[in-house]
């Protein structure tokens, strides 16, 4: 539940209140559950397996559990680089992935000149300011300008699907892009729909 509420908050609530909060934050619609789980796994992949830092777990800030978050799916930073690099990610979760989903993701990544939406960056920076993370917020605010060097930008397409995703990556992976790099990561779970149902049933128990 760390992605949806925050373990620190749940720990201060006591079990009955925490259980109610969890139940009321969990999406009930299958499409939203699928998308949220895909975004959670993609975020954890970046945190544990890539050189990027995720500055904010944005699903904590959903205003309605059965609505998708607006803005870029994922924004992450490579703070070890000088100047800092930024990753813009799109996540697709499908029982049967098709090429149209990858095309949609690539189209979204190419929007705004390949840069993250200024509104998405502003949302993250304001939340970080409220938390007192001013230094990290300043980094995001510096990236809101339109003249960010495309060489500092990495794109990520992350998929969670019941079928093998790699055939749908081949064409888009060969395309020239305006940014420094476009990455594709696909996680195949044969029982995609059953996995999602089990995860949310366990959380709601």
Image (spheres, rainbow, N blue to C red):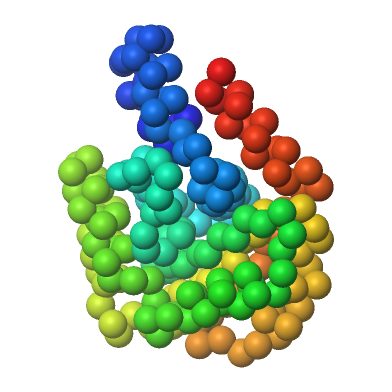
* Quadrant that contains the C terminus: top right
Residue 8 figure quarter? top left
Q: Residue at x 57, y 67 (%)?
A: 156
Q: Position of residue 88 (x, y in %)?
A: 46, 67
Q: Tell me what residue is drawn at x 81 percent, y 47 percent.
A: 190
Q: Nearer the viewer, residue 20 or 7?
A: 20
The vertical placement of 108 against 27, above or below, is below
Q: Could you say where residue 4 lies in the image, as x and y percent from the top left?
A: 42, 36
Q: Give percent across and percent down for residue 202.
A: 61, 24
Compared with 140, 200 (above or below) is above
In the shown orientation, is residue 200 left or right of residue 118?
right
Q: Is 172 located above or below residue 142 in the figure? A: below
Q: Is residue 52 left or right of residue 64?
A: right
* Residue name at image x 42 percent, y 17 percent: 19
Q: Quadrant of residue 123?
A: bottom left
- 30 versus 95 height, above or below: above
Q: Residue furthest front?
A: 29
Q: Position of residue 160 (x, y in %)?
A: 67, 54
In the foreground, 30 or 190: 30
User: How many numbered discs sit on the rendered protein?
Assistant: 0
Q: Residue at x 70, y 38 (%)?
A: 195
Note whether residue 81 is visible.
Answer: no
Q: Is residue 193 visible?
A: yes
């Amino acid at each position: 539940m760390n992605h949806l509420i925050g373990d620190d908050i749940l720990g201060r609530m006591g079990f009955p209140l925490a259980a109610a909060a969890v139940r009321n934050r969990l999406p009930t619609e299958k499409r939203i559950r699928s998308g949220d789980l895909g975004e959670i796994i993609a975020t954890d992949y970046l945190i544990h397996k890539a050189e990027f830092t995720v500055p904010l777990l944005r699903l904590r800030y959903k205003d309605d559990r059965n609505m998708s978050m607006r803005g870029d799916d994922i924004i992450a930073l490579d703070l070890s680089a000088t100047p800092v690099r930024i990753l813009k990610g799109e996540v697709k979760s499908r029982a049967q992935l098709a090429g149209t989903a990858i095309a949609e993701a690539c189209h979204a990544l190419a929007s705004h000149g390949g840069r993250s939406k200024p509104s998405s960056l502003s949302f993250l920076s304001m939340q970080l300011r409220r938390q007192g993370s001013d230094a990290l917020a300043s980094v995001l605010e510096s990236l809101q300008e339109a003249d960010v060097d495309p060489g500092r930008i990495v794109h990520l397409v992350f998929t969670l699907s019941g079928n093998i995703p790699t055939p749908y990556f081949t064409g888009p992976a060969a395309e020239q892009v305006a940014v420094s790099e476009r990455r594709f990561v696909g996680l195949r779970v044969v029982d995609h729909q059953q996995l999602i149902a089990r995860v949310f049933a366990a959380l709601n128990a």
